[in-house]
Amino acid sequence: MREQFSNMEMLGSTYKISCGIRGDLTCNIYVCLGSGQYSAEETAKALSETRMKEDMEWELYDFEEENGGTGVGYTFTHSDESNELEVMVELCTMNGYKCVYELVAERGDLDQAEEAIEELFGEFIDEKFEEIDRIEAEIAEEVKKGEKSSKRK
C-alpha cells in the first residue's frame, strides 16, 4: 500500500490541513482567519497564479455550497505522455470558516481523488476542524479575559 500522510500546521493566521497518498493525490485545506496576505482570497489567488505560470490549461467555475452560498474555483490540467495532472483550487466556506480547498490528482480524475480523500481522510479532516474550533474558542476566551482585566485597571 502506498504511503498515506495527514497533518495540520499553522502558516501565519492560517491553519493548513494536509492529507493524501504520496505520488498519487494531495488535499490541502487552508482555513484562513487573517486578512491581507493571509486571507482566503489571497491564498486562492496565489495558488491559482502558481498553476497558471506552469502553463496548465485552466477553467474557472462557480458552484453552490452546502450552506447555500456561492463558491468559486479553478480546475487545472496538464497532460504529457507519462501522466495527466489535474488540480482543483476552490475558494469556499467549510464548517463556518473561509477556506481554500486544493486537490491535486497526480494521475488525473479529480472526482475519483475527491471520493478517495473523503473515504480515507474524512474523519481526520472533521477532527481537525473540531480542533480548530476548540483552539479558536480558547483564544477568544483569553482575549475576553484580557479585555476584562484591562478595564479594571
Image: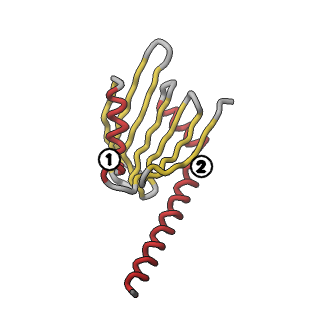
Q: How many marks?
A: 2
Q: Quadrant of residue 120?
A: top right
Q: Would you say the residues marked 1 and 2 are in contact, meaning their CB atoms lie under 8 Å apart?
A: no
Location of the C terminus (image quadrant) = bottom left
User: Residue 6, relative to residue 67: is it above or below?
Assistant: above
User: Residue 3, relative to residue 11: is it above or below?
Assistant: above
> Where in the figure is residue 88, as x and y percent of width and height?
41, 35
> Where in the figure is residue 128, as x and y percent of width and height?
55, 54
Which marked residue is nearer to the observer: mark 1 or mark 2? 1
Disc 1 or 2, which lies upstream in sequence? 1
Q: Quadrant of residue 75?
A: top left
User: Which secondary structure lies at badge 2?
Assistant: helix
- Kindly identify which numbered label has been placed on residue 106: none
> Where in the figure is residue 74, as x and y percent of width and height?
35, 35
Q: Residue furthest top?
A: 81
Mark 2 surroundings within 10 Å by alpha-carbon count, few (fewer than 14), some (14 through 19), many (20 or more) = some
- Kindly identify which numbered label has been placed on residue 124: 2
Residue drawn 37% across and 37% down? 47
> Where in the figure is residue 2, as x and y percent of width and height?
65, 30
Residue drawn 38% across and 53% down? 98
Q: Residue furthest bottom?
A: 152
* In-front residue for pair 46/124: 46
Residue drawn 51% across and 69% down? 138
Residue drawn 33% across and 23% down? 55
Location of the N terminus (image quadrant) = top right
Type of residue at label 2? Phe
**In the rendered image, which residue does mark 1 sit on?**
41
* In-front residue for pair 9/131: 9
Type of residue at label 1? Glu
Residue 35 appears left or right of 113: left
User: Which secondary structure lies at badge 1?
Assistant: helix
Whole-number angstrom distance, CA of label 1 to CA of label 2: 25 Å
